[in-house]
Image: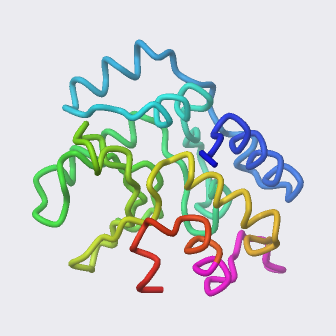
Amino acid sequence: MPADLDNSLPELLGHLSILSRPVTGVLQAGLPERVLFEKSVIAGLVLPDDVIRLYAWRDGTLDYPGAMLDDIHIIPGFYFPNLDETLANHAVFRDDTRWDPAWLPLLANGGGDFIAVDCSGTPGSWGQVRHFMLGEPEHPVLYLSVSSMFETFVEAFNRGIFFLHPSGYLDADDDAYAQLARMMNPEARGWDAY
């Protein structure tokens, strides 16, 4: 069954609201498709439909004075940068030998690791999502689409695999998440390493 981003995004926001996460108050209004198209063309990227729908829903998080990374995480360890920050990160890494210029760094951890989507337009890899880890030589495909990634995130919240740590930050049972992600994304071979 194909993933349904239009349901997953409000469900994710609902989980974050129930957990009283500050990020719910700093997610920016979505962008018009025209703006997304113009900015992606300038960057040399072909945005998959689910990336367009994601940024049309919300334009990432608003950077505000005193913001703590934990406060803006949408899943444990990662936040959703606005499109301008995402494109700035893309420009920084574009010529890095560890990076593919067609990757859009969709989610960031604030330390140089990203969840990146392939925006090459090339059949077979276009839309695939991988984990770029700054100090690693390999960057495995973890999801075949942004939609399946968000569907997996929502299911992790549903099952309590993503949860609020007693210290007040989003946390995860990493082993349980790898097992869930492998089950929900069997074609994405990156989970074999976890």
User: Residue 166 falls in which quadrant of the image?
Assistant: bottom right
Residue situated furthest front in the rendering: 1
User: Residue 77 falls in which quadrant of the image?
Assistant: bottom right
**The magenta stretch spans residue 101:** no
Examine the rendered structure and indicate whether residue 125 appears above or below residue 59: below
Q: Which residue occupies 48% across, 38% down? A: 82
Examine the rendered structure and indicate whether residue 11 appears above or below residue 144: above
**Side (left or right) of 189 relative to 22:** left
Q: Where residue 168 sits: x, y (%)?
A: 79, 72
Examine the rendered structure and indicate whether residue 79 appears above or below residue 179: above
**Side (left or right) of 9 relative to 61:** right
Q: Which residue occupies 69% across, 41% down? A: 9
Foreground: 94 or 194? 194
Q: Which residue occupies 65% across, 41% down? A: 4
Q: Where residue 54 sits: x, y (%)?
A: 55, 35
Magenta-drawn segment: 165-179
Q: Which residue occupies 51% across, 69% down? A: 186
**Side (left or right) of 187 relative to 138:** right
Q: Where residue 179 sits: x, y (%)?
A: 62, 81
